[in-house]
Amino acid sequence: MESALWIIPVLGLLCWSISWAMFAGFRAVPPAAGAGARRVSVIIPARNEENNLGRLLASLRSQPDPPHEIIVVDDQSEDGTADCAREHGARVVSGTPMPEGWIGKPWACQQGADAADGDWFLFLDADTEIEPGGLERLLALGRGEDEVHSVCPYHKVRAPYEQLSAFFNAIMLLGMNAFTLKGARAREIGLFGQVLLVSRRRYEAVGGHGPVRGEVLENFHLARDFVRSGATCHCWLGLGTISMRMFPEGCRDLVAGWSKGFVSGAGNTARGALAGVSMWISGLFVAAIGLAMLPLGGVPVRAAIAGVYALYVLQVYFVFRKAGRFSFWSALAYPVGLVFYHVVFVRALWRLRRGGTIRWKGRDVG
């Protein structure tokens, strides 16, 4: 029995070692160096974002060099989103009902782009917040019209339940296929949906959001359209540049928010990234199962299993901290978060397979 237990640390260590290839290209938005994008229209699609929007708009106005224009597309909100936008000096575009075949966010983004007169578009989710000097760093990325840049905002965590978002954030980072050893040269790179910087010319060349009008995760499909048009896609980490706090309303919102997109995300992730994430998760489970089987082995195998688990804790913590302000305790007890991730995934998949929908922002997302 003890000899069979050695499979656990050997397999776990193998997966742990190979997984580092997925993390080798983590990079934050660099300091601004020289002029970048000019005449930038900031476009913010917003539905029922009264409680979030003010922080983003205030952070934009506090930047040393504010953008050319700030457009908030009020996507038929049922709260004071439009009033909040006007109070902060933003230009409000009142969203019209979705045409057939369109869903909420792509339609809101398209309306914002149609109303904008800048040479560059910076699409921002309403729950993000620009850090001091962050706008300058973001716009400095826009030096070539044949490049598209997206940023994953740094996840601010305040309430204990928000620690449960750790694996969702980590796997979202890895699923972009942009932080491997190949970096921007990797095939099938995705884009983050929260922050997108693109020139008007490049955006219009692919037809804007029209070709992705019905996609829940429009960012994945936009990335493919941009690449097919000859552009290079770049992904960055938002630490020190832009942050977000997701789902402050509670755990129910957290479950609904992650459910609406990541089942679709699994189907749109590049095969290589999906294989890498699957291997990493397998290694995580192997190490966790090994910990539960410690009493069955002698001292050498127990030490090996415990050592591999410790290595995974450190690796998980490294990835978590790249994504957000997640605690060491979340990494130490990572099996809890990993099980929660899979429960939410299976629940969402089961509901969608039965013809159900996910409720989000007062709308059904199927």
Image (cartoon, helix red, strand yellow):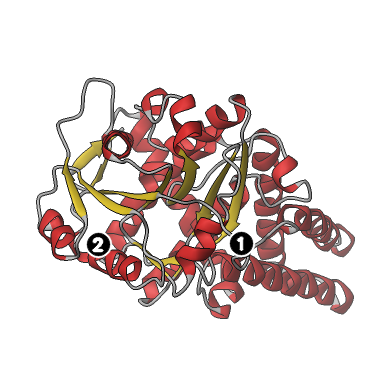
Q: Position of residue 290 (x, y in %)?
A: 72, 65
Q: Identify the amino acid type marked 2.
A: Leu
Q: State which quadrant residue 230 falls in.
A: top right
C-beta proximity under 8 Å, tags 1 and 2:
no
> CA gap, disc 1 to disc 2?
30 Å
Give the labeled residue for mark 2.
Answer: 53
Q: Identify the amino acid type marked 1.
A: Gly
Counting residues from the start of the chain, the first of labels 1 and 2 encountered is 1
Crowding near the residue tagged with mark 2, few <14, some 14–19, many ≥20 C-alpha atoms within 10 Å: many
Q: Position of residue 229 (x, y in %)?
A: 58, 25
Nearer to the camera, 287 or 241: 241
Look at the image and tell me whether residue 154 can be seen: no
- Tell me the number on the disc at residue 208: none
Give the labeled residue for mark 1.
Answer: 34
Judge left or right: residue 10 versus residue 61: right
Look at the image and tell me whether residue 44 can be seen: yes
Judge left or right: residue 68 versus residue 294: left
Taking the spot 61% from the left edge, 76% from the top edge, the residue there is: 332
Q: State which quadrant residue 269 falls in.
A: top right
Taking the spot 44% from the left edge, 75% from the top edge, the residue there is: 132
Nearer to the camera, 139 or 169: 139
Considering only vertical position in the picture, is 329 above or below 151?
Answer: below
Judge left or right: residue 213 versus residue 154: left
Instruction: Report the quarter where the N terminus lies.
Output: bottom right
Say what secondary structure mark 1 lies in. loop
Q: Position of residue 100 (x, y in %)?
A: 23, 20
Foreground: disc 1 or disc 2? 1
Considering only vertical position in the picture, is 116 above or below 292?
Answer: above
Say what secondary structure mark 2 lies in. helix
Considering only vertical position in the picture, is 56 above or below 191?
Answer: below
